[in-house]
Image (cartoon, rainbow, N blue to C red):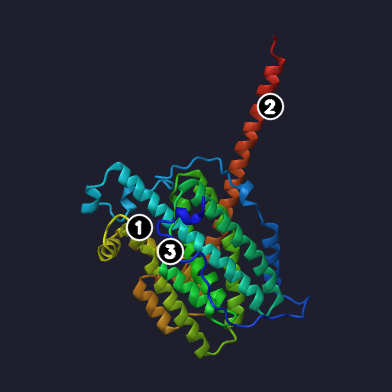
Amino acid sequence: MSTRDLYTTAPSTPTWQVPAAGAARFSWEYEDGRERLLALYQKGKDKQWDGATRIDWDLDVDPYDPLGTPDEVLNLYGTRHWAKMTEKDKGDLRRHYSSWQFSQFLHGEQGAMICAARIVESVPDLDAKFYSATQTMDEARHAEIYGRFLHEKIGMLYPINDNLKGLLDDTLRDSRWDMPYLGMQVLIEGLALAAFGMIRDTTDKPLPKQILAYVMQDEARHVAFGRMALRDYYRQLSDAELREREEFVIEGCYLMRDRLRGVEVLENFGIPKREAEELSEQSEFLHLFRKLLFSRIVPCVKDIGLWGERLQKAYLDMGVFDLGDSNLDLLMTQDEEIAERLDAERFAAEERARVTEVAEAIAEGAAPE
C-alpha cells in the first residue's frame, strides 16, 4: 500500500523542494584532525546496526494503544468531549496521537538525514565530514525504522507539522555552514531526544521501547558531535555573529515548543482549531511535557557558548531557564547504557530459550519409543 493512502490528510505534492544555498567545501588536509572527533567517528563506525535484525519486528502492537497511553495524558481527558466518547473512540484517539508523534519523528529523521548530508558537503574540516557521513547513515536507518513502525504496526501517518517544516526550511536555506548543526543537531535532535526518552521510559510496550532505545543510542553521539564542532567554532565568532545565532535559537525554540500540541489530531476528531488549541494549552500534562522536552536543548545551547541576555530572557519566558545547569553528559551516557542493557536482557532471554529448546530436543531423542 502506498504511504499516500495511509496519511490522514495526503500532502499536496509527493516531494518538498527547499532551495539550497552555500558552498561545497573540499579539504586537502587528510592527516590532521581533532582527536575527540576522530574518536567519535570511530565509535560511529563501530556502532552501526541493522534495523531489520536488531529490532524484533514479530512483536505484536495494538494499533489502538501502541504505547500504553494512560487516559490522563490525552488532551481531551476530563473535557465535555471525553464524556461523549465510547471506548472505540478513545482507542481511535490513542491511535491518532501515536501516529502523529511517530510521524513527526519520521519526518524529523528525514530532515536530519538531509542536514547531515549538507554538513558533509559544507563543513570545512575533514574530521567533521567523516563523522557526518556516519550520521547520515544513522538517520537513514532511523527514518526506515519509524516508517516501518507506522506502516506495519499503526497503519496511519500524519503530514509534517507546519512549525517543524518551518524550522527545517530555515535551517536548510541558510548558507552558513554551521546552521545545519545548530538547527538540527542542537534544536531538532535535542528536542527529539527528550521526546524519545519520555516515551521510552514510560511505555510498557516492548517494540516501541526497543526502537526508541536503539535510536537514542545513536542520537547521543550526534548531539556530542554537534557540541564539539560548534563549541570550537563559536569561540572564534564576534558578538554580533553570536547574537545572530542566538536569535535563530530563540525563534526555533518557540517554533518547536508550539509544534507539540497535536492540534491536528483534535481537528481530525471534529474539534474546531481554536478550541483544539485552547484545550491543548489547558492540559497540565502538556506543560510538564514541554518543560521536559527542553532538558537536552538548554544545557547544550549554554555549553556551546550561546547564552546572551536575550536568549536567557526567552528561556525564562518559556520556564526552562533552570535546565541550563543540567548534566547533559550524564543524560547521554544513560541513553547509551539503556540500549546496551536492553540488548543484554533480550539476548540472555533468547539464549535461555535456545538452551531450553536444545534440552527438550535431547530429552525427546533419548526417550524410549
Quadrant for the C terminus in the image: top right
Residue 36 seen anywhere in this rendered image of the structure: no
Which numbered tag is attached to residue 265?
Answer: 1
What's the residue type where badge 3 is placed?
Leu
Q: Secondary structure at mark 2?
A: helix
Towards the viewer: 111 or 342: 111
Residue 170 in the image: x percent, y percent? 49, 77
Residue at image point 43% right, 67% down = 294
Question: Are the residues tagged 2 and 1 within 8 Å (C-beta)?
Answer: no
Q: Which mark is residue 293?
A: 3
Based on the displayed image, in which of its 4 quarters is residue 258 positioned? bottom left
Mark 1: secondary structure: helix
Between 40 and 329, the one nearer to me in the picture: 40
Q: Is residue 219 left or right of residue 29?
A: left
Which residue occupies the extreme right position in the image? 31
Q: Which of labels 3 and 1 is toward the front? A: 1
